[in-house]
Amino acid sequence: MTGSNAPIGVFDSGLGGLTVVRELIRQLPNESIVYFGDTARVPYGPKGEETIIRYSQDIATFLRKQGVKAIVVACNTATAHALPTLRAEQDVPVIGVIEPGARAAVAASRDGRIGVIGTRGTIRSRAYDKAITALEPGATVTAAACPLFVPLVEEGWLDSEPTRIVARGYLEPFTHGKIDTLVLGCTHYPLLKTVIGETIGRDVRLIDSAQETAAETGRVLREQGLQATGSDARYRFVASDDPEQFLAVGQRFLGAPLERVELVTLGV
């Protein structure tokens, strides 16, 4: 049985999941974390379901070997395709980013007009549509892929005119009162909250899946008696390729300095 002071394992296709780590550190400061960013095989969005499941299984196996007590799938595309498989195979809790975001969106929406933005893979899966309408059958879900948001974030163009132009193009289907709530269905997107909020209108509630996933993780740990009892939290960061790039760009997502990134190559 995994001890309560064991770390939480978190993984993503690349760097975006660090926004989930940021929230975990803020909300659960006593918890240790092992983060794996699959930078050798990013992006997951355009890849097929079987490939994404295989990649996710590789990473979950690696994280369990590190002794983690729970696994957070901090990638919307991996959650959409691989979560049921991982939950069936793993003997620790596995938490995804879609269910918490869907629940928060339904709770926040005034009249069930909910928008979702994400990668092509996430939007194509219709995972948010299904999760939202399962909770609120009368909801109307409008979804759009915003693939250029990821490279803009990774280039650091968080509040620039090119980003505003792209945002206006992507978000036009949601403007003029068509939605009252918008799910940021990619872990990169919280870094664009300012631009997205200004483009979509301040009367639209933005749902940050990173915040909601951290809160859900805390709830699961409490329910299963797995909260850390000490205060000596430790953090490990692992990349499958180019740890120097991870070190340089990852600090933007984490909101804090990164001292070291390990390199671990998994199956290709």
Image (spheres, rainbow, N blue to C red):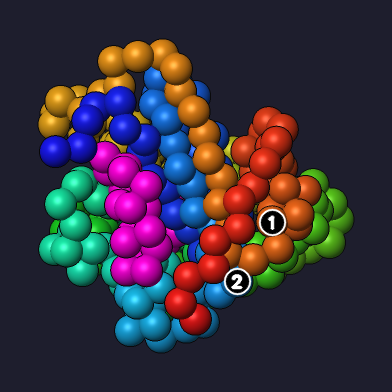
- Measured from the top left, where is residue 123 in percent x and y? 43, 72
Front residue (pair 211, 11) = 11
> Is residue 190 a member of the stretch shown in magenta?
no
Which secondary structure lies at badge 1? helix
Name the amino acid, label 1: Pro
Look at 42% across and 48% down and name the residue there: 10
Q: Residue furthest right?
A: 161
- Measured from the top left, where is residue 57 in percent x and y? 32, 68
Q: Is residue 3 left or right of residue 255?
A: left
- Measured from the top left, where is residue 110 in percent x and y? 33, 40
**Quarter of image, res 146:** bottom right
Name the amino acid, label 2: Ala
User: In the image, which residues are magenta?
Assistant: 56-76
> Is residue 62 a member of the stretch shown in magenta?
yes
Numbered circle sitting on residue 40:
2
Q: Which residue is mark 1?
A: 243
**Quarter of image, res 191:** top right
Crowding around mark 2 (Cα neighbors within 10 Å: few <14, some 14 to 19, many 20+) is: some
In the image, is residue 162 above or below residue 91?
A: below
